[in-house]
């Protein structure tokens, strides 16, 4: 690893986009790093980078939003580390970073419990109509329309998990407490896992009452949850997505929900964030969340510390705390 900064100067960290942890980093660690922010300049991004970031060795970038492209990397000849505040890496050009021998530090498993909590929460909300009931009461409908539509219990349901990594495993642990029968699809069958394995998502959907999407977005998983999978899931099936929006064919999902060809959906991620299909807004069997599964106070404190630990390790020529090494993903 390369050391950063000249003698007597703070190590320079280029910041692209608006990471949630940046205010904490600046307020607590401005005496340890100099944060270079193109967002404070009127110059176009590439011009700013070419003019002021030639010596930047470390880059901090949030997940989603801005894409780290070859054009940006071309402006950063000294770059040796990318620190992303996310677990998903679909905003990074992994082959190009590998080719340039640029290391990656990411959030690792930091968010797994939070995301799993929200996934189960969304499933419960859709099945038992928690948000719909909240609107029923707050809009004053209850006194005049005494009957509220029946919900469904979670206990004992057959749940399919797409992606049994750390997040998917945490989801499964929680659902076991509800007596759910769990099956999964993943790149490979997991040894020592007691759940039923399906090698393709279509078969998984055909044997489940709800699908929970926990995998990352890759070329292979884009629109993996397509019309055929939704048909296999059935008109009473529920889809919960805490992975990435583009894993699901969103237009097909909207069409089937409007036509009553799916039982419901709980979505924390969307294909074209922050744009969300307006057709979903008035559906009581759909619960929407603005991509906030990881945004808990506890996780933001942990993320701030993790970013600092990775940066300090890099500038001290020590191994990264949470390196990403599977560039084949």
Image: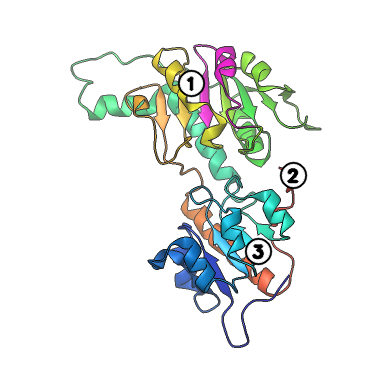
Check if residue 173 falls in the magenta segment: no
What SS does tag 1 mark? helix
Check if residue 222 falls in the magenta segment: yes
Closer-to-camera residue (253/136): 253
Q: Is residue 158 above or below residue 23?
A: above
Q: Is residue 161 above or below residue 40?
A: above
Estimate the x, y position of residue 24 in percent, counting from the top left.
Answer: 46, 65
Residue 171 appears left or right of 278: right
Residue at mark 2 to residue at mark 3: CA–CA distance: 18 Å
Estimate the x, y position of residue 291 in percent, counting from the top left.
Answer: 46, 42
Residue occupying image coordinates x 72% and y 21%: 198
The residue where tag 1 is placed is 252
Local crowd at mark 1 within 10 Å, few (<14), some, or many (≥20)? some
What SS does tag 2 mark? loop
The residue where tag 2 is placed is 328
What SS does tag 3 mark? strand
Q: Which residues are magenta?
A: 221-241
Residue occupying image coordinates x 68% and y 53%: 96
Q: Quadrant of the N terminus?
A: bottom right
> Which of the 4 quarters of the picture holds residue 114?
top right
First reached walking from the N terminus: tag 2 or tag 1? 1
Extreme bottom residue here? Answer: 8
Closer-to-camera residue (41/18): 41
- For the residues labelled 1 and 3, say whether their Cβ atoms are less than 8 Å apart: no
Residue occupying image coordinates x 61% and y 61%: 74
Estimate the x, y position of residue 148 in percent, counting from the top left.
Answer: 31, 16
């Amino acid at each position: 690893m390369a050391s950063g900064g000249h003698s007597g100067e703070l190590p320079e960290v280029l910041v692209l986009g608006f990471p949630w942890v940046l205010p904490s980093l600046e307020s607590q660690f401005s005496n340890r790093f100099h944060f270079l922010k193109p967002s404070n300049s009127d110059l176009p991004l590439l011009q700013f980078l070419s003019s002021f970031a030639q010596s930047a060795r470390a880059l901090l970038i949030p997940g989603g939003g801005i894409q780290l492209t070859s054009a940006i990397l071309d402006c950063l000849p000294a770059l040796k580390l990318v620190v992303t505040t996310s677990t998903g890496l679909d905003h990074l050009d992994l082959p190009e970073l590998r080719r340039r021998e640029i290391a990656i530090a990411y959030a690792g498993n930091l968010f797994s419990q939070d995301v799993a909590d929200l996934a189960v929460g969304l499933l419960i909300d859709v099945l038992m109509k928690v948000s719909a009931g909240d609107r029923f009461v707050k809009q004053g409908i209850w006194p005049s329309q005494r009957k509220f539509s029946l919900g469904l219990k979670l206990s004992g349901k057959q749940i399919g998990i797409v992606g049994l990594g750390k997040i998917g495993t945490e989801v499964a642990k929680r659902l076991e407490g509800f007596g759910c029968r769990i099956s999964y699809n993943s790149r490979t069958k997991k040894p020592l896992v007691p759940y039923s394995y399906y090698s393709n998502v279509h078969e998984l959907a055909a044997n489940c009452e709800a699908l929970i999407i926990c995998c990352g977005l890759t070329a292979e998983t884009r629109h993996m949850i397509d019309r055929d999978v939704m048909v296999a899931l059935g008109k009473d099936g529920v889809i919960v997505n805490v992975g990435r929006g583009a894993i699901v064919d969103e237009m097909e999902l909207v069409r089937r929900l409007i036509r009553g060809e799916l039982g419901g959906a709980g979505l924390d991620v969307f294909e074209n964030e922050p744009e969300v299909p307006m057709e979903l807004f008035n559906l009581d069997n759909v619960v929407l969340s603005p991509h906030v599964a990881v945004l808990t106070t506890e996780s933001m404190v942990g993320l701030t510390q993790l970013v600092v630990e990775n940066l300090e390790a890099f500038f001290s020529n020590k191994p990264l705390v949470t390196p990403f090494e599977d560039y084949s993903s």
